[in-house]
Image (cartoon, rainbow, N blue to C red):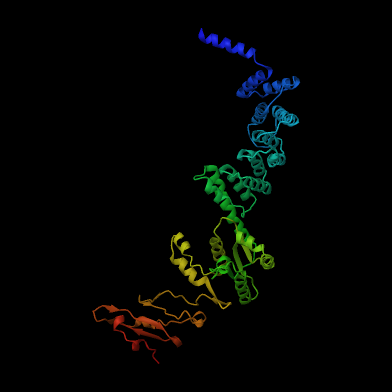
Protein backbone atom coordinates (compact mmCIF):
# COMPACT_ATOMS: atom_id res chain seq x y z
CA UNK A 1 0.00 0.00 0.00
CA UNK A 2 2.85 2.34 0.92
CA UNK A 3 4.71 1.51 -2.33
CA UNK A 4 1.59 2.26 -4.35
CA UNK A 5 1.22 5.61 -2.62
CA UNK A 6 4.83 6.50 -3.44
CA UNK A 7 4.29 5.58 -7.09
CA UNK A 8 1.15 7.70 -7.25
CA UNK A 9 3.03 10.56 -5.59
CA UNK A 10 5.77 10.26 -8.24
CA UNK A 11 3.23 10.37 -11.05
CA UNK A 12 1.56 13.44 -9.55
CA UNK A 13 4.99 15.08 -9.26
CA UNK A 14 5.76 14.40 -12.94
CA UNK A 15 2.41 15.87 -13.96
CA UNK A 16 3.31 19.09 -12.18
CA UNK A 17 6.82 19.37 -13.78
CA UNK A 18 7.50 22.38 -16.02
CA UNK A 19 8.21 21.72 -19.74
CA UNK A 20 12.00 21.92 -19.28
CA UNK A 21 11.89 19.42 -16.41
CA UNK A 22 9.63 17.09 -18.35
CA UNK A 23 11.96 17.33 -21.36
CA UNK A 24 15.00 16.42 -19.27
CA UNK A 25 13.22 13.47 -17.64
CA UNK A 26 12.17 12.04 -21.00
CA UNK A 27 15.61 12.74 -22.51
CA UNK A 28 17.29 10.85 -19.65
CA UNK A 29 14.95 7.94 -20.31
CA UNK A 30 15.92 7.91 -24.01
CA UNK A 31 19.60 8.14 -23.09
CA UNK A 32 19.28 5.24 -20.65
CA UNK A 33 17.54 3.10 -23.29
CA UNK A 34 19.80 4.33 -26.13
CA UNK A 35 16.68 5.45 -27.98
CA UNK A 36 18.00 7.82 -30.65
CA UNK A 37 14.74 8.20 -32.58
CA UNK A 38 12.86 9.07 -29.38
CA UNK A 39 15.49 11.64 -28.43
CA UNK A 40 15.35 13.26 -31.88
CA UNK A 41 11.56 13.48 -31.63
CA UNK A 42 11.92 15.17 -28.23
CA UNK A 43 14.48 17.60 -29.66
CA UNK A 44 12.23 18.62 -32.54
CA UNK A 45 9.33 19.16 -30.13
CA UNK A 46 11.50 21.25 -27.82
CA UNK A 47 12.69 23.43 -30.71
CA UNK A 48 9.13 23.95 -31.95
CA UNK A 49 8.07 24.99 -28.44
CA UNK A 50 11.09 27.29 -28.06
CA UNK A 51 12.26 25.49 -24.93
CA UNK A 52 15.54 26.75 -23.55
CA UNK A 53 18.13 23.97 -23.82
CA UNK A 54 21.40 23.93 -21.87
CA UNK A 55 24.76 22.15 -22.06
CA UNK A 56 23.38 19.00 -20.51
CA UNK A 57 20.59 18.65 -23.08
CA UNK A 58 22.84 19.21 -26.08
CA UNK A 59 25.57 16.90 -24.81
CA UNK A 60 23.05 14.13 -24.11
CA UNK A 61 21.64 14.45 -27.63
CA UNK A 62 25.09 14.49 -29.24
CA UNK A 63 26.17 11.53 -27.13
CA UNK A 64 23.19 9.52 -28.40
CA UNK A 65 24.01 10.46 -32.01
CA UNK A 66 27.69 9.52 -31.72
CA UNK A 67 27.02 6.44 -29.62
CA UNK A 68 24.69 5.08 -32.30
CA UNK A 69 27.78 4.75 -34.50
CA UNK A 70 29.27 2.30 -31.96
CA UNK A 71 32.39 4.49 -31.59
CA UNK A 72 33.81 2.50 -34.48
CA UNK A 73 36.07 5.18 -36.03
CA UNK A 74 35.74 3.29 -39.33
CA UNK A 75 34.75 4.46 -42.76
CA UNK A 76 32.25 1.69 -43.46
CA UNK A 77 29.12 2.34 -45.51
CA UNK A 78 26.57 3.94 -43.21
CA UNK A 79 22.97 2.74 -43.24
CA UNK A 80 19.96 5.06 -43.10
CA UNK A 81 19.85 5.17 -39.30
CA UNK A 82 23.50 6.21 -39.12
CA UNK A 83 22.95 8.80 -41.83
CA UNK A 84 20.14 10.16 -39.72
CA UNK A 85 22.38 10.24 -36.65
CA UNK A 86 25.02 12.19 -38.57
CA UNK A 87 22.57 14.71 -40.00
CA UNK A 88 20.84 15.36 -36.69
CA UNK A 89 24.16 15.43 -34.83
CA UNK A 90 25.56 18.30 -36.89
CA UNK A 91 22.15 20.02 -36.87
CA UNK A 92 22.06 19.89 -33.07
CA UNK A 93 25.64 21.20 -32.83
CA UNK A 94 24.88 24.11 -35.17
CA UNK A 95 21.73 24.95 -33.18
CA UNK A 96 23.79 24.92 -29.98
CA UNK A 97 26.29 27.44 -31.37
CA UNK A 98 23.49 29.57 -32.83
CA UNK A 99 21.84 29.68 -29.41
CA UNK A 100 24.98 31.25 -27.96
CA UNK A 101 25.93 28.22 -25.85
CA UNK A 102 29.64 27.46 -25.93
CA UNK A 103 30.49 23.77 -26.34
CA UNK A 104 32.30 21.76 -23.68
CA UNK A 105 35.02 19.16 -24.11
CA UNK A 106 32.35 16.45 -24.20
CA UNK A 107 30.55 18.35 -26.96
CA UNK A 108 33.63 18.62 -29.19
CA UNK A 109 34.56 14.97 -28.60
CA UNK A 110 31.08 13.81 -29.65
CA UNK A 111 31.07 15.99 -32.78
CA UNK A 112 34.61 14.83 -33.66
CA UNK A 113 33.33 11.26 -33.61
CA UNK A 114 30.52 12.26 -35.95
CA UNK A 115 32.99 13.96 -38.31
CA UNK A 116 35.19 10.86 -38.46
CA UNK A 117 32.18 8.63 -39.09
CA UNK A 118 31.25 10.96 -41.94
CA UNK A 119 34.74 10.48 -43.39
CA UNK A 120 36.09 13.91 -42.52
CA UNK A 121 38.93 13.37 -40.06
CA UNK A 122 40.39 16.76 -40.99
CA UNK A 123 37.24 18.46 -39.67
CA UNK A 124 37.49 16.45 -36.47
CA UNK A 125 41.09 17.59 -35.98
CA UNK A 126 40.15 21.23 -36.63
CA UNK A 127 37.40 21.01 -34.01
CA UNK A 128 39.89 19.75 -31.43
CA UNK A 129 42.55 22.33 -32.32
CA UNK A 130 40.00 25.15 -31.99
CA UNK A 131 38.89 24.15 -28.51
CA UNK A 132 41.06 26.92 -27.13
CA UNK A 133 38.77 29.64 -28.43
CA UNK A 134 36.04 28.24 -26.19
CA UNK A 135 38.52 28.27 -23.27
CA UNK A 136 38.40 24.51 -22.86
CA UNK A 137 41.30 22.04 -22.81
CA UNK A 138 41.27 18.81 -24.83
CA UNK A 139 41.57 15.43 -23.19
CA UNK A 140 43.00 12.18 -24.51
CA UNK A 141 39.57 11.03 -25.69
CA UNK A 142 39.22 14.25 -27.71
CA UNK A 143 42.11 13.20 -29.98
CA UNK A 144 41.13 9.54 -30.23
CA UNK A 145 38.73 9.72 -33.20
CA UNK A 146 41.11 11.75 -35.36
CA UNK A 147 44.26 9.81 -34.48
CA UNK A 148 42.70 6.40 -35.04
CA UNK A 149 41.15 7.56 -38.33
CA UNK A 150 44.47 8.83 -39.73
CA UNK A 151 46.28 5.68 -38.67
CA UNK A 152 43.59 3.47 -40.20
CA UNK A 153 43.89 5.27 -43.54
CA UNK A 154 47.74 5.16 -43.31
CA UNK A 155 48.08 8.95 -43.30
CA UNK A 156 51.26 8.87 -41.24
CA UNK A 157 52.17 12.57 -41.42
CA UNK A 158 48.71 13.65 -40.30
CA UNK A 159 48.83 11.13 -37.45
CA UNK A 160 52.17 12.59 -36.34
CA UNK A 161 50.62 16.07 -36.43
CA UNK A 162 47.88 14.90 -34.07
CA UNK A 163 50.45 13.45 -31.68
CA UNK A 164 52.51 16.66 -31.76
CA UNK A 165 49.41 18.72 -30.97
CA UNK A 166 48.57 16.36 -28.12
CA UNK A 167 51.97 16.79 -26.52
CA UNK A 168 51.87 20.57 -26.97
CA UNK A 169 48.58 20.63 -25.04
CA UNK A 170 49.97 18.49 -22.22
CA UNK A 171 48.09 15.37 -23.32
CA UNK A 172 50.20 12.22 -23.56
CA UNK A 173 49.21 9.15 -25.60
CA UNK A 174 48.78 5.81 -23.88
CA UNK A 175 49.15 2.24 -25.10
CA UNK A 176 46.26 2.20 -27.65
CA UNK A 177 47.40 5.47 -29.22
CA UNK A 178 51.10 4.55 -29.22
CA UNK A 179 50.30 1.14 -30.69
CA UNK A 180 48.54 2.61 -33.74
CA UNK A 181 51.30 5.21 -34.17
CA UNK A 182 53.87 2.42 -34.11
CA UNK A 183 51.83 0.45 -36.64
CA UNK A 184 51.45 3.32 -39.10
CA UNK A 185 55.20 4.04 -38.77
CA UNK A 186 55.98 0.41 -39.51
CA UNK A 187 53.66 0.30 -42.52
CA UNK A 188 55.08 3.56 -43.88
CA UNK A 189 58.69 2.46 -43.28
CA UNK A 190 59.22 5.52 -41.09
CA UNK A 191 61.90 4.01 -38.84
CA UNK A 192 62.85 7.43 -37.50
CA UNK A 193 59.47 7.55 -35.77
CA UNK A 194 59.81 5.16 -32.87
CA UNK A 195 57.41 5.11 -29.94
CA UNK A 196 58.88 2.20 -27.99
CA UNK A 197 60.41 4.41 -25.31
CA UNK A 198 57.12 6.24 -24.76
CA UNK A 199 55.30 2.92 -24.71
CA UNK A 200 57.71 1.61 -22.11
CA UNK A 201 57.12 4.65 -19.91
CA UNK A 202 53.33 4.39 -19.94
CA UNK A 203 52.79 0.62 -19.94
CA UNK A 204 54.56 -1.93 -17.78
CA UNK A 205 53.14 -4.79 -19.84
CA UNK A 206 51.59 -4.59 -23.31
CA UNK A 207 48.69 -6.67 -24.58
CA UNK A 208 48.95 -9.27 -27.34
CA UNK A 209 47.88 -6.98 -30.17
CA UNK A 210 50.45 -4.33 -29.22
CA UNK A 211 53.17 -6.98 -28.94
CA UNK A 212 52.33 -8.13 -32.47
CA UNK A 213 52.68 -4.55 -33.76
CA UNK A 214 56.07 -4.20 -32.03
CA UNK A 215 57.31 -7.44 -33.58
CA UNK A 216 56.14 -6.28 -37.01
CA UNK A 217 57.96 -2.98 -36.53
CA UNK A 218 61.26 -4.70 -35.75
CA UNK A 219 60.89 -6.88 -38.84
CA UNK A 220 60.22 -3.83 -41.01
CA UNK A 221 63.19 -1.99 -39.50
CA UNK A 222 65.50 -4.91 -40.28
CA UNK A 223 64.02 -5.23 -43.77
CA UNK A 224 64.63 -1.53 -44.34
CA UNK A 225 68.36 -1.64 -43.58
CA UNK A 226 68.70 -4.87 -45.58
CA UNK A 227 67.05 -3.27 -48.60
CA UNK A 228 69.22 -0.17 -48.28
CA UNK A 229 72.45 -2.16 -48.11
CA UNK A 230 71.37 -4.40 -51.00
CA UNK A 231 70.72 -1.36 -53.18
CA UNK A 232 74.14 0.18 -52.57
CA UNK A 233 77.59 -0.76 -53.77
CA UNK A 234 80.06 -2.92 -51.93
CA UNK A 235 82.04 -1.19 -49.21
CA UNK A 236 85.58 -1.85 -48.11
CA UNK A 237 85.13 -0.17 -44.73
CA UNK A 238 82.34 0.70 -42.30
CA UNK A 239 82.83 3.58 -39.84
CA UNK A 240 81.27 3.87 -36.38
CA UNK A 241 80.40 7.56 -36.75
CA UNK A 242 79.56 8.26 -33.11
CA UNK A 243 82.75 6.61 -31.86
CA UNK A 244 85.00 8.62 -34.17
CA UNK A 245 83.14 11.90 -33.75
CA UNK A 246 83.23 11.76 -29.95
CA UNK A 247 86.87 10.62 -29.69
CA UNK A 248 88.68 12.61 -26.96
CA UNK A 249 85.85 15.13 -26.71
CA UNK A 250 85.33 14.79 -22.95
CA UNK A 251 86.33 18.34 -22.07
CA UNK A 252 84.42 21.53 -21.31
CA UNK A 253 83.90 22.74 -24.88
CA UNK A 254 83.96 19.28 -26.39
CA UNK A 255 81.25 17.92 -28.63
CA UNK A 256 80.74 15.82 -31.70
CA UNK A 257 83.69 16.49 -34.03
CA UNK A 258 82.57 16.15 -37.62
CA UNK A 259 86.07 17.15 -38.76
CA UNK A 260 87.52 14.01 -37.12
CA UNK A 261 84.93 11.87 -38.84
CA UNK A 262 85.63 13.57 -42.16
CA UNK A 263 89.37 12.92 -41.74
CA UNK A 264 88.72 9.19 -41.32
CA UNK A 265 86.35 9.12 -44.30
CA UNK A 266 88.83 10.94 -46.55
CA UNK A 267 91.74 8.71 -45.50
CA UNK A 268 89.76 5.54 -46.21
CA UNK A 269 88.58 7.04 -49.50
CA UNK A 270 92.17 7.62 -50.62
CA UNK A 271 93.42 4.22 -49.44
CA UNK A 272 90.68 2.27 -51.23
CA UNK A 273 91.20 3.76 -54.69
CA UNK A 274 88.42 6.35 -54.46
CA UNK A 275 85.81 4.06 -52.90
CA UNK A 276 83.63 5.65 -50.26
CA UNK A 277 83.36 3.98 -46.85
CA UNK A 278 79.98 3.62 -45.14
CA UNK A 279 79.40 5.86 -42.11
CA UNK A 280 76.74 4.68 -39.64
CA UNK A 281 75.26 7.56 -37.66
CA UNK A 282 72.23 7.84 -35.41
CA UNK A 283 69.37 9.78 -37.01
CA UNK A 284 69.04 12.08 -34.02
CA UNK A 285 72.74 12.98 -34.28
CA UNK A 286 72.34 13.53 -38.01
CA UNK A 287 69.48 15.99 -37.48
CA UNK A 288 71.45 17.99 -34.91
CA UNK A 289 74.46 18.19 -37.24
CA UNK A 290 72.28 19.30 -40.15
CA UNK A 291 71.22 22.36 -38.16
CA UNK A 292 74.70 23.78 -38.72
CA UNK A 293 74.98 25.13 -42.31
CA UNK A 294 78.71 24.39 -42.40
CA UNK A 295 78.02 20.69 -41.77
CA UNK A 296 75.08 20.38 -44.14
CA UNK A 297 77.07 20.37 -47.38
CA UNK A 298 79.39 17.60 -46.20
CA UNK A 299 76.57 15.40 -44.90
CA UNK A 300 74.54 15.89 -48.07
CA UNK A 301 77.57 14.85 -50.13
CA UNK A 302 77.94 11.66 -48.08
CA UNK A 303 74.24 10.96 -48.52
CA UNK A 304 74.46 11.49 -52.27
CA UNK A 305 77.47 9.15 -52.51
CA UNK A 306 75.75 6.44 -50.47
CA UNK A 307 78.37 6.86 -47.77
CA UNK A 308 75.98 7.63 -44.90
CA UNK A 309 73.22 5.59 -43.28
CA UNK A 310 71.25 6.97 -40.34
CA UNK A 311 69.75 4.57 -37.82
CA UNK A 312 66.20 5.11 -36.51
CA UNK A 313 65.48 6.80 -33.20
CA UNK A 314 65.32 4.45 -30.25
CA UNK A 315 67.58 1.83 -31.84
CA UNK A 316 71.15 0.91 -30.98
CA UNK A 317 73.40 2.02 -33.83
CA UNK A 318 76.04 -0.54 -32.76
CA UNK A 319 74.01 -3.37 -34.23
CA UNK A 320 73.79 -1.55 -37.57
CA UNK A 321 77.51 -1.04 -38.11
CA UNK A 322 78.17 -4.59 -36.91
CA UNK A 323 75.61 -5.96 -39.35
CA UNK A 324 76.99 -3.91 -42.25
CA UNK A 325 80.61 -4.91 -41.54
CA UNK A 326 79.70 -8.59 -41.38
CA UNK A 327 77.50 -8.39 -44.49
CA UNK A 328 80.20 -6.78 -46.64
CA UNK A 329 83.06 -8.75 -45.00
CA UNK A 330 84.96 -5.49 -44.75
CA UNK A 331 86.95 -3.47 -42.23
CA UNK A 332 85.28 -1.77 -39.27
CA UNK A 333 86.72 1.52 -38.00
CA UNK A 334 85.97 1.89 -34.29
CA UNK A 335 87.68 1.97 -30.92
CA UNK A 336 84.68 0.30 -29.33
CA UNK A 337 85.74 -2.89 -27.56
CA UNK A 338 82.23 -4.31 -28.12
CA UNK A 339 82.27 -6.08 -24.76
CA UNK A 340 78.50 -5.84 -24.37
CA UNK A 341 78.00 -7.54 -27.72
CA UNK A 342 80.38 -10.33 -26.76
CA UNK A 343 78.27 -11.06 -23.69
CA UNK A 344 75.07 -11.03 -25.75
CA UNK A 345 76.36 -13.68 -28.14
CA UNK A 346 76.15 -17.40 -27.43
CA UNK A 347 79.87 -17.78 -27.90
CA UNK A 348 82.69 -15.26 -27.84
CA UNK A 349 85.66 -17.03 -29.49
CA UNK A 350 84.56 -16.53 -33.08
CA UNK A 351 83.62 -12.91 -32.35
CA UNK A 352 87.05 -12.16 -30.92
CA UNK A 353 88.67 -13.70 -34.01
CA UNK A 354 86.43 -11.59 -36.22
CA UNK A 355 87.44 -8.44 -34.30
CA UNK A 356 91.12 -9.24 -34.68
CA UNK A 357 90.80 -9.60 -38.45
CA UNK A 358 88.46 -6.70 -39.21
CA UNK A 359 88.70 -3.95 -36.58
CA UNK A 360 90.66 -0.83 -37.51
CA UNK A 361 91.68 1.37 -34.60
CA UNK A 362 92.58 5.01 -34.92
CA UNK A 363 94.17 7.91 -33.06
CA UNK A 364 94.48 11.67 -33.44
CA UNK A 365 97.84 13.02 -32.33
CA UNK A 366 98.19 16.79 -32.77
CA UNK A 367 95.31 16.76 -35.27
CA UNK A 368 97.06 14.05 -37.27
CA UNK A 369 95.08 10.88 -38.00
CA UNK A 370 96.66 7.49 -37.51
CA UNK A 371 94.94 4.28 -38.58
CA UNK A 372 96.00 1.01 -36.97
CA UNK A 373 95.11 -1.69 -39.47
CA UNK A 374 94.46 -5.31 -38.44
CA UNK A 375 97.58 -7.52 -38.26
CA UNK A 376 98.45 -9.64 -41.27
CA UNK A 377 98.73 -12.67 -39.03
CA UNK A 378 96.85 -14.08 -36.08
CA UNK A 379 98.10 -13.25 -32.59
CA UNK A 380 96.45 -16.35 -31.16
CA UNK A 381 98.75 -19.10 -29.86
CA UNK A 382 99.08 -21.71 -32.62
CA UNK A 383 99.18 -25.46 -32.10
CA UNK A 384 101.78 -27.61 -33.85
CA UNK A 385 101.01 -30.98 -35.31
CA UNK A 386 102.80 -32.58 -32.36
CA UNK A 387 100.59 -30.71 -29.90
CA UNK A 388 103.15 -28.19 -28.66
CA UNK A 389 102.04 -24.52 -28.76
CA UNK A 390 103.86 -21.70 -30.50
CA UNK A 391 103.53 -18.27 -28.93
CA UNK A 392 103.59 -15.35 -31.32
CA UNK A 393 105.02 -12.27 -29.63
CA UNK A 394 105.09 -9.07 -31.62
CA UNK A 395 105.84 -5.43 -31.01
CA UNK A 396 102.35 -4.09 -31.63
CA UNK A 397 103.64 -0.50 -31.59
CA UNK A 398 105.89 -1.08 -34.59
CA UNK A 399 104.28 -0.18 -37.92
CA UNK A 400 105.97 -3.13 -39.62
CA UNK A 401 104.05 -5.47 -37.33
CA UNK A 402 100.98 -4.67 -39.35
CA UNK A 403 102.65 -4.81 -42.72
CA UNK A 404 104.96 -7.80 -42.78
CA UNK A 405 103.72 -11.21 -41.63
CA UNK A 406 105.97 -13.38 -39.51
CA UNK A 407 106.51 -16.75 -41.18
CA UNK A 408 106.93 -19.00 -38.19
CA UNK A 409 108.95 -22.12 -38.73
CA UNK A 410 107.39 -25.30 -37.47
CA UNK A 411 110.60 -27.36 -37.50
CA UNK A 412 110.61 -27.18 -33.70
CA UNK A 413 107.82 -29.73 -33.67
CA UNK A 414 110.53 -32.33 -33.77
CA UNK A 415 112.47 -30.74 -30.93
CA UNK A 416 112.72 -32.77 -27.78
CA UNK A 417 111.37 -31.34 -24.57
CA UNK A 418 113.79 -30.78 -21.73
CA UNK A 419 113.40 -31.77 -18.14
CA UNK A 420 113.07 -28.97 -15.62
CA UNK A 421 114.63 -28.85 -12.17
CA UNK A 422 111.49 -30.25 -10.58
CA UNK A 423 111.32 -33.19 -12.94
CA UNK A 424 108.42 -31.79 -15.09
CA UNK A 425 108.80 -31.61 -18.80
CA UNK A 426 108.62 -28.08 -20.17
CA UNK A 427 107.47 -27.09 -23.62
CA UNK A 428 109.62 -24.83 -25.77
CA UNK A 429 108.62 -21.16 -25.79
CA UNK A 430 109.22 -19.54 -29.18
CA UNK A 431 109.98 -15.91 -29.96
CA UNK A 432 109.72 -14.46 -33.49
CA UNK A 433 112.95 -12.98 -34.76
CA UNK A 434 114.05 -11.23 -37.87
CA UNK A 435 114.82 -13.36 -40.94
CA UNK A 436 112.31 -15.96 -39.78
CA UNK A 437 114.55 -17.32 -37.02
CA UNK A 438 113.19 -18.84 -33.82
CA UNK A 439 114.98 -19.31 -30.49
CA UNK A 440 113.69 -21.98 -28.14
CA UNK A 441 114.10 -21.51 -24.41
CA UNK A 442 113.21 -24.21 -21.94
CA UNK A 443 112.98 -24.54 -18.19
CA UNK A 444 111.50 -22.35 -15.48
CA UNK A 445 111.07 -18.63 -16.22
CA UNK A 446 112.85 -17.69 -12.95
CA UNK A 447 115.89 -19.74 -13.97
CA UNK A 448 116.26 -17.86 -17.25
CA UNK A 449 118.75 -15.06 -17.50
CA UNK A 450 118.50 -12.17 -19.93
CA UNK A 451 121.36 -13.71 -21.85
CA UNK A 452 119.15 -16.69 -22.71
CA UNK A 453 116.81 -14.36 -24.63
CA UNK A 454 119.46 -12.79 -26.84
CA UNK A 455 119.10 -13.34 -30.56
CA UNK A 456 121.45 -15.90 -32.07
CA UNK A 457 123.45 -14.87 -35.06
Q: Is residue 354 above or below residue 203?
A: below
Identify the image quadrant of the C terminus: bottom left
Give x and y (percent) for residue 401. Answer: 49, 81
Residue at image coords 37%, 82%:
412
State the residue lying farthest toward the left.
Answer: 422
Give x and y (percent) for residue 81. Answer: 70, 27
Q: Is residue 174 above or below residue 225?
A: above
Residue 107 or 268: which is nearer the viewer? Answer: 107
Give x and y (percent) for residue 2. Answer: 51, 9
**Is 1 positioned to the left or the right of 155 in the image?**
left
- Quadrant of residue 326 in the image? bottom right
**Is 332 positioned to the left or the right of 56 in the image?**
left
Residue at image coords 46%, 63%:
342
Instruction: For residue 145, say whether it is visible.
Output: yes
**Is 193 positioned to the left or the right of 376 in the image?**
right
- Quadrant of residue 317 in the image? bottom right
Instruction: For residue 443, say whether it is visible.
Output: no
State the residue lying farthest toward the top.
Answer: 1
- Quadrant of residue 136 in the image? top right
Total marks shown come to: 0
Q: Is residue 120 above or below residue 50?
A: below
Give x and y (percent) for residue 446. Answer: 29, 81
**Is 409 positioned to the left or the right of 208 in the image?**
left
Residue at image coords 58%, 70%:
237
Residue 384 or 64: which is nearer the viewer? Answer: 64
Amino acid sequence: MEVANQANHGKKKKKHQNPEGQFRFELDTCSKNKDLSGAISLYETAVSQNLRLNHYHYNALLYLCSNSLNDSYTLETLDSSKDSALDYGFQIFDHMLASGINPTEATITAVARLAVAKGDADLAFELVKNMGKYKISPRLRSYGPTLFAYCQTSEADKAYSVEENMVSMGVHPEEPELAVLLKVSSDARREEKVYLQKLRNCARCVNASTAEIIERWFCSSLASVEDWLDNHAEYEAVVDGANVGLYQQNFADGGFSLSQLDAVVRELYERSQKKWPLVILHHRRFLSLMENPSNRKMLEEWKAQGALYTTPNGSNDDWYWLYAAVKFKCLLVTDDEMRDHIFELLGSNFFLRWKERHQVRYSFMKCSLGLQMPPSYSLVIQARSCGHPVEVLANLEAPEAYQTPYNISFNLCKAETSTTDNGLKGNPISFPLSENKITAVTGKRKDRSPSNLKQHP
